[in-house]
Image (cartoon, rainbow, N blue to C red):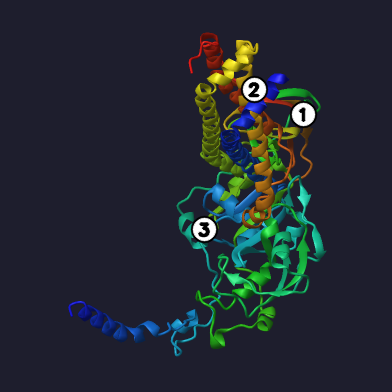
Amino acid sequence: MRLVMPRVLLSIMLLVATPLWAAEPRTLEWPQLIPAGAPIVQPQTAPLHDLSQLSDALAAESAPAAHQQVPNAPVVKALDGQQVKLPGYIVPLEVSEEGRTTEFLLVPYYGACIHVPPPPSNQIVHIVSEMGVRVEDLYQPYWIEGRMQVKNTSSELADAGYQMEAEKIYAYELE
Amino acid sequence: MYLLRLALASLANRRFTAFLTAFAIALSVCLLLAVERVRTEARASFASTISGTDLIVGARSGSVNLLLYSVFRIGNATNNIRWESYEHYARDKRVKWAIPISLGDSHRGYRVMGTNSSYFEHYQYGRKQNLQLAEGRAFASDPFEVVLGAEVAQALHYKLGDKLVLAHGVAAISLVKHDDKPFTVVGVLQRTGTPVDRTLHISLGGMEAIHIDWHNGVPARGAGRISAEQARNLDLTPKAITAVLLGLNNKISTFSLQREINEYRNEPLLAILPGVALQELWSLMGTAEQALFVVSLFVVLTGLIGMLTAILTSLNERRREMAILRSVGARPWHIAGLLVLEALALAVVGIAAGLGLLYLGIAIAQGYVQANYGLFLPLAWPSAHEWSLLAIILGAALLMGSVPAWRAYRQSLADGLSIHL
């Protein structure tokens, strides 16, 4: 008798619970969460993602942008065609599949230059290297050896500057 | 030679332990090589994805972040930039070409990118290679045309003229689709081995059109709907895009233009040099790569120590073998040589089996890895670096084999034939 009671109870509970159990959940789609009579909002045409007002608000307080002081700085024509050796920091432009930098800008200083204007165009050398150099650390200076090419200011396109085909690239070390 | 034959015969006698030892070495070698290969291939595929682009311009965030979402389609944009900002810099006299990019939608897990014809003209990958169409043409003036990357076309079996529906958001299984505005496949690009293969390219107008009646964050209902036909007649100039790729006339002006964009008064923008951002990304990943490499080195070491233990424990059981060898005229150094050769044989078999496992693994996983991670693992011969790693493992095995060899040498001098059984 003691054993029968729990069983009866259990079957009664099951009987009561079964209809709940069997009810299929209603499949909803997202639009069904919006009531039928909800007002239809006409598409607005103002652009999303507009942060421009932010800069307008800041514009009155900010200093003028730090322009490159001399974008078409004069160059030393006499260096054209000379075999030279110049130390500097490598700013990679083109990286090969083997991870070697084959095209880069050589600059006299690197990093922490956000406080001052970018270097003038006669302080940057555009260097192409057939073999490339494996740059592990951007803060490591290198010696670059090769023939200097000087392009004179031809127009307002700002294509003046120094170019070099690197023949030798090796790490610059403090003596 | 006879020593080697003797060593192999002795190993064959204990083939089950020998097999397990070699298998442990094989697994560890396979792991090391797999880690190395994935590392080098991941770097190569990252480096070959973008070429010839001087500056990437996007909403102000981080340089690595901007590089990842604009070029590698990893992660999402933090914000969009205004169309006027793009037009301003596209007109700049220092800029040779500008490619606008608009992201955010997907099709069955593949990202959709809105752009214009300058993308097919100027975007470069690998060693300054331009994109080529395998079939069909680039999208034209109709907004509902799509050009597929090679991987998309292959995996989803799309042909020219097929219609497909783009989905909102970037999940692989999308619940919300732009199914009122289907797109027609007009072109398929050639395989590049870059994320371009896994991208669907539509015009900026198309990107604008599928979202034109979406301005409340949900698809429009009832009268708010704008059909594909109506959309064609509307002005589909985008109001915002995600990023711009710039090519310059002269690389020397990179810094000045970068600074100018970063301090642009009309909108907070960020311009990055892709090469520098890539370098930053690598120094970031470098730590994880080193950790993986060190772990796999230790696994190899564990495999080799397992071999050492197996040989050392066998020494006691094999006193009799050694004694018999001594009795038939073997010198103590013969015994030592026998054990070194045994270690060497185990290592060579282990390495060869490890290579076999690696190639088997690559052959099986190649398609899956390419489809899911965009990483192409070639079935190529081991590189010089991999060969040197294998040589180091062999050297280490030799060194380890000399420990039991030395002990056996000493024992065979001391025990000699006087062993009591």
Q: CA distance from mark 1 to mark 2?
A: 59 Å
Q: CA distance from mark 3 to mark 2?
A: 61 Å
Q: Chain of mark 1?
A: A
Residue B309 appears left or right of B126 = left
Residue at 73% in and 20% down: B1
Residue at 80% in and 57% down: B132
Query: How far across and down, in percent of the image, does residue A145 sit?
Result: 73, 24
Q: Residue furthest left?
A: A2
For label 1, count other residues whose C-alpha is less than 10 Å away and answer few (under 14), some (14-19) or many (20+).
many
What residue does disc 3 label?
B78
What residue does disc 2 label?
B341
Query: How far across and down, in percent of the image, does residue A128 sit?
Result: 75, 35
Mark earlier in primary sequence (3, 2): 3
**Residue B115 in sight:** no
Above or below, comparing residue A84 to residue B165 in the picture: above
Q: Amino acid at mark 2?
A: Leu
Front residue of this view, candidates B119 and B399: B399
User: Helix or strand or loop: what does disc 2 sit on?
Assistant: helix
Query: How far across and down, in percent of the image, does residue B182 sit?
Result: 67, 77
**Image quadrant in which you'd find residue B2:** top right
Q: Amino acid at mark 1?
A: Met
Q: CA distance from mark 3 to mark 1?
A: 43 Å
Asked if the residue at tag 2 contacts the one at tag 3, i.e. Cβ–Cβ closer than 8 Å, the answer is no
Residue A148 marker: 1
